[in-house]
Structure formats: C-alpha cells, structure tokens
Image (cartoon, rainbow, N blue to C red):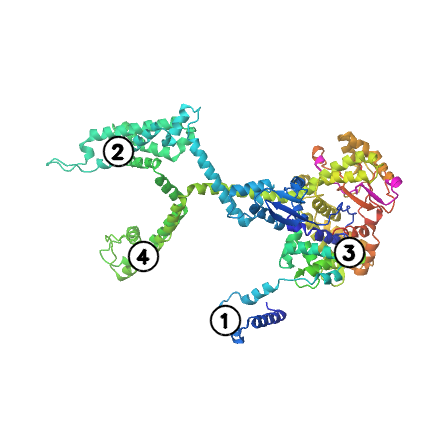
Amino acid sequence: MCTPSKGAQWKNDLEHIRKDHGFSRKVLLNCCLVRRIITWASPSPKDSVEDELELSTVRHRPEGLEQLEAQTRFSRKELQILYRGFKNECPSGVVNEETFKDIYSQFFPQGDASTYAHFLFNAFDTDHNGSVSFEDFVMGLSILLRGTVQEKLIWAFNLYDINKDGYISKEEMLDIMKAIYDMMGKCTYPVLKEETPRQHVEVFFQKMDKNKDGVVTIDEFIDSCQNDENIMRSMHLFENVL
Amino acid sequence: MAAGVAAWLPFARAAAIGWMPVANLPMPVAPTEKNKRQDEVIILNVSGRRFQTWRNTLDRYPDTLLGSSEKEFFYNEETKEYFFDRDPDVFRSVLNFYRTGKLHYPRYECISSYDEELAFFGIVPEIIGDCCYEEYKDRKRENAERLMDDQEDNKDAKLPNMTFRETMWRAFENPHTSTMALVFYYVTGFFIAVSVITNVVETVPCGSAPNQKEVPCGERYTVAFFCMDTACVMIFTVEYLMRLFAAPNRYRFMRSVMSIIDVVAILPYYIGLVMTDNEDVSGAFVTLRVFRVFRIFKFSRHSQGLRILGYTLKSCASELGFLLFSLTMAIIIFATVMFYAEKGSSSSKFTSIPASFWYTIVTMTTLGYGDMVPKTIAGKIFGSICSLSGVLVIALPVPVIVSNFSRIYHQNQRADKRRAQKVQKARLARIRLSKAGSSSAFLHSKRNGLFNEALELTQLPYKMSLSEQSSTKEEQHLGKSSSLLESQHHHLLHCLEKTTNHEFVDEQYYQQSYLEGGLQNYPPRSPSLSSQDGVTGTCCSRRSKKHNTPLRNASAPAHMQPLTHPQTHHHGLQELSTIHIQPLSTSRSSLNMRIDEPAPLNCQSSQITTAIISIPTPPVTTPEGDAHLPTGPSHQNVVKVSAL
C-alpha cells in the first residue's frame, strides 16, 4: 500500500527524474497516465506499480559510521564487522520477520525457534515498523553486549512484556516459556512434559513477583534479578562476544 | 551452519541474554577466543591471478582445504601469499562459495575439470545450489554415459574365460559379436519372414480347375505348406531351446515377453499335431492358427523401432486409457440419443442402442461407411454433432502419444533419469545429514568433551604446579577438537539446556527413554539427590568403576585437590584451567551406550571450556560435590570439578 510518506517520496523522486532528464511535465504526466490506465486495466495487482516502487525504495542504507559510533558503544571496527555480516545475509539492508526467523532457526536445528524469534524480532524492532534495519540491530546489540546490567535487564523485561504494557503477566510469561522450550525440540532428556513450561513460570513468578499480585513490574523484575547471583553473573556472560 | 549465518552468531549469543532471567541454573562458561586475531585480508594467488578475502570468510568452512590449516602448505614466505597452481576460472566459483555460502556450477566449464577442482579444494559437489544442480547432474550423467559407452565397446571383446553357455548368450544378445551369431540372426529372420508369408499365402485363392470352385492355396498344396510350416517351427523350437539353455537366469528368461511370444508362435503347431485325430476340436484348431500371426512379433528382436513402439504403447497406457474411456462415454451418449431420435422413422436401421454403437463409432472416427444413416431431422442434427465431437475427442490424446513416442527415442536417458532420481534422494539425504550433523555435532562434542575432560583431570594434579604454559597447552589440546565458531555455537546450545533444565539428546536415545516412559529407577545412593533429576554421584562412581583407572584416581581426591590448588597457587581470581560447571541434570553421552543398565542414566559434566573465570568466593565443595537444587539463590558458587 502506498503510505502518504511513500507517496510523497515517489512524487519527489519523479520530480528529480524529471529535472535530471529534462522531461517535460506533459511527458511525465502521460507516462503516469499510461501507468494508471494499465493498473486500472489489470484487475488483480491493484497497487502493483506503487508496490514495485515500494520494493525498490525498501532498500535501506544505514546512517553513517560516525553517527552509529556515537549512538552505540561499538568501536568503528566492530561496526564494520557487524555491518558486513548483516549486509551479507540481508542485501536489502533490512531484515523482515521471515528472514529473521530463518536465521535464528539455523542455530537451533533440533527445535522450532520461530516463536522465540518472533518475540526477539519484536524486541529488536523498536519502532515497530515490521522490519529490523541495521540501526535497530546495532542498538539492540549495543545494549546486550555493552550495556550496563540495568539496561540489559530492562531489555529482557521488554522482551518478556509482549504487549508492552509495563507488566509481565503469567500468560505472557507462559508464551515466552513455551517459545523457549520449543527451541529444545522433541528429543530431550528428561522428556518434555506439557506442564514443564507452566511449572517453570510458577517458579519464575515465585521468585520475581514480590507483592504477589500476579504480574511482575519492571522494578520487581530488576530488584529480584539483582538479588540473584546466577542471573547477575550470567548477564556478563557474553560480554566478549564481539 | 551456513556461512552467512555464522556472521550472525554474535547476535544469537547476545539474544541469549533473554533467557538468563528465566533460567534457574547457572550458565556454562563461554569459550573465549584465545589470541583473538584481528581480521586480516589474505591473498590467494591462483596461477597468477590474485584473489583477496578476509581470513574469516575462509574459516567458515573448516573442513575444506582453504578453511583448514592445510592451506599453510601452500604459503609462500617471500611473497606472503598462498599460491595455488590451479585453474583461476574455476577458483572463482570456489571462492564465491566461501563468500556467499552457495556453490555454483558455471555452464561453460567442463564437468571433469570442475570435479577435479572441487576435489582438490575439498568441497563436496552435493553442496551445489539448486539453481545449478540439475545442470551439473545432467552433465555428469552424460559424461558417465560416454565413458560407459566407451567401456561397452571394449566389453564386447571376448573375455578370456567365458563358458560356452555365456558365449552363446552373448551371441544371441549381440549378433555382431561373431560371424556365427550374425548368420544365426539372419537365418532366423529369414525364417520368420518365410513363416509369415506362408501364413498369408495360404489363404489366397489359387487358380482352380474349371469345374471346381476356387480353393485357397493352403488346401491345394497342403503338403507343401505343411512342410514349410514344419521347417519353420523346427527352427523356432531349436532357437527357443538354445536360448533357454544359454540364458543366465532361466526363470527370468521364461517370464520375459520375447520368450512368451516365441512359445505362443510355436505352440499352435504342436497342439495341431496332437489334435488332428479328433474331429470335434478341429474348429478350435483352426482358431489356433490365428496365433501363428504372433510370429511376426518375433521381428521385434530384429528391429529397434518395433521395440520402441511397444514401449511407447506401454508408457502411454494412461493416455490410451483416457482415450478409450472418453470414447466409450461419448459412444454411449450418442448411441442412446440417436436411437431415440430415430425411433420414430420406419425401416430404421437403429434397431437398438447396441446397434447404434456401430453408427456412432463409424461417425466419430470420421469413417462414415454409410451402411447406417439417420433419416429424421433430429437424427441428422445429432449425427452431425456426433461427428464433430468425435474429431475433438480423438484428436486430443493423440499428440500426447506422439510426443511419448519421440520421447522414448531417448530411452537411455529416461532410464538414467530414473537412476538420477535415486541420486537426488541420496543427495537430499546427504544434505539433511549434514544439517542434522550440526545438532549431532553438539552431542558429539559433549561426548568428546567428556574424554578431554577425563584426560585433563588425570593430568590436572600434575599440571597444577605449572604456570599458565600448561594451561595453554591444554587449551590447544582442546581447541583441536572444534573450531571457535562451533564451540561458541555449542555454548549457546548449552545455555539453552541450562535455561530449560533439559538436555538435547539424539533421536534413538529419545525413543528409548520415551518408551521406557516413567521408568526412572535411579538407585538413590547419594543423599543429595534432587527429586526431578537424576543421580550424579552414583553414576559417576559407577562409571568410574567401569572405566579406566586413571579416572578413578581423579574421582575422590579430585574433588578437593584441584580446587584447593587454585587457592594456594593463584589466590582467588584468575585461573586458566578446565573448570566444569556441575550440571544438575544428568546428560547423555556415548559412554552411556556402553553401560547397559536398566536405567539409561549417566552423568556427565557439562561442556568443557577453557576460560578465564573469576572465582570471587572460595568454592564450597560438598563431599558429594553435587548439592544443587533448582532454586536459584541457594548455591553461591557452583564451580566444581565434576566427580569422574
């Protein structure tokens, strides 16, 4: 669909083309007219012309290296390495959810990583536009790899809070838990039972939900995590990843 | 793991932070990159053409020549580049494989040179991407056929030790092998022709005496024809018996189509010999003569085209069936309609619906004999519709049959494509296997980890006194087993195991445990059992009994010693050694398979990693060494050496 911004961009592009190539307005108008007639005549792809232009503009170029260096905690070289890998896998510059799920699933061959990848995607896609650009990717990684423990915990809270209402309910946690257990797949020892995720959620809530009101707020979450040695230690686990 | 995806491993590992708050168990230590090299550009000089790429790109596939240390053999010290004396054009495809993860087959390239290059660089051709795989396989098949044809020409040369029987069979199958065979071939062909002509001429009316009516030649010259028939049948019988004798597999020969034709061709004669006495069945005897026409099918041994026709009809069975079916439907419909349309008119030939069948068939096939014609207007209208539709119905399946016939001219390639289907399945199976290999690689490395760990522990007391040099040696020793990428991936999977408190096992193990269901008889020998998970101390001690003694040494004393040593030598903090995080749950290992106990349990410590870890508090070692409970805060420090 042609969003207003895209329509304006298209208009701009056309203006540029016209000016660059010296077409007369009339020629361009005729061209557009012809296109419109074609799209009207061909019933099925309604916005095909716009779609084609859409697709070509979806090619995304990230902001400059200096800006990203300023916004994230990565060094120039690290950003270079990250971008090379990113661009290799996604030449168009953005990752959509399908590709994201594919990539993530390759690391977990035995199970089904798509649900968890979906939640991860939503956690990375901070502006919720359905695609993760390099900026989103690198911001997320910056928090995860170079952020303070507080920031990491906030990120994790955001991951668990599926509807972003500031509370983790038991249902949300159950979804997340099931997604994590799905990644294990079928062949596990001991055999995964139906109620294992639920039990795990219970344990989690016992630990985290201080006032026992059935939801975990961000403060409860951060507090409980900071009191847990294991969690604190594991937060530092991946610091040397890049 | 695919190449491009390897670049995303840091991301996947970072995302694992999402599991941390959920996990109740401590996480295993991450593998570090020892001497983390800055990514450098390496130069590959292939016959003068220089290719440059990142070292990391090549490291993505550690089991190929360029990805492993094998390329060091080609390193040129003076020019600081890797020199390969190979074809640079093909090398382009090879290098692109590393870059993109897809191997392409350039169409202009000769298949055997391409294969050689792939073999040199250690790349399995099955990885060729789907876009180029068909082409590659076709070319390879053509090449193989060409080689096979060349070989077959040599095969026709007489092998030294062939028995008489084998020689005869070869002579029958390939008449061009020897002169005798060729003579035999032509003689039989001649006699088949003679026999067929005899059958035909038998029925021609010969000149008659003026007062007699015309008789067919067969009755006039009975003796002559009988002699000819006998001679032919003699030859055919001898030929059949000789083929039967020479056939390598008699039963299969007797079931083959050609032999059935042979039998049917000669049988009427013998039946006729037997039955001439009995007058009643002479009528049946006459009909048997019809079967003599089957002798003409014997020509199919002599003619390739006839065989192809036969195969065509066989392969187009479905189209022919469709043709027949649609024709039958149309015939019945039109016959019914014509019958009722013509019912009114007098002296109508359309006496019944079956009688109308004849009219419909003749009309639909546009024969139009004219022996039955409709007289009423309705009849004429429907008759014309019938003839028009007949053209359509018959014209539709015929091109299919024709194209089938032309297709079967390339019959050899048809059969090979069927063989290629099996190869395709094999290839897919191989790719699936390599993908499954990544999951089994994790299980495998756990097993390997166990052995390495065992080795480590035996030397641990001795090595403890040394400084970091020993640990680097250990590092190298362990580093040999898996590349860094793999170890990081395995660490990630291990973290997942810890988060969910379940372990990955392989398929057959899972089946086993699933079947056994709740059969969890962990003999509780150690008081520190956790309810949901199994024994740690007991299996370990059990296993240490069954396994080699060096492990034994490490079992009890190892609990205390290696842990106290770090205390004495390196106060508190940095220790490069193999430290294992004691798992709470039990895990599978291949050692498990060797232990045949009813409870398929085993314990194994977690993945070995060499890492610099900081031990902020002195490790609390309980005598069993495994007092872990699923609740988090209770264990302060879980770094213990496993009890092997």
Residue A83, given in percent of the width and then of the height, sits at 68, 56
Q: Quadrant of residue B216?
A: top left
Q: Which comes sooner in the sequence, label 1 or label 3? A: 1
Mark 2, secondary structure of its residue: helix
Mark 4, secondary structure of its residue: helix
Query: Residue beneath label 3, please?
Result: A146
Circle nearer the viewer, 4 or 2:
2
Query: Residue beneath label 2, please?
Result: B194
Circle nearer the viewer, 1 or 2:
1
Question: Distance from label 2 to label 3 (Cα)?
Answer: 97 Å
Query: Residue beneath label 4, please?
Result: B386
Residue at image location 68% in from the left, 48% down from the top: B56
Is residue A135 among what the camera can see?
yes
Circle nearer the viewer, 1 or 4:
1
Mark 3, secondary structure of its residue: helix
Viewport quadrant of the C terminus of chain B: top right
Residue B312, given in percent of the width and then of the height, sits at 38, 44
Label 2 in the same subunit as label 3: no
- The amino acid type, in three-letter code, at marker 1 is Val
Pointers 4 and 2 in contact (CB under 8 A)? no
Question: Distance from label 1 to label 2 (Cα)?
Answer: 77 Å
Q: Which comes sooner in the sequence, label 4 or label 2? A: 2
Mark 1, secondary structure of its residue: helix
Q: Badge 2, how many Cα within 10 Å: few under 14, some, many 20+?
A: some
- What's the chain of the residue with tag 1? A
Q: Badge 3, how many Cα within 10 Å: few under 14, some, many 20+?
A: many
- The amino acid type, in three-letter code, at marker 3 is Arg
- The amino acid type, in three-letter code, at marker 2 is Val
Pointers 1 and 3 in contact (CB under 8 A)? no
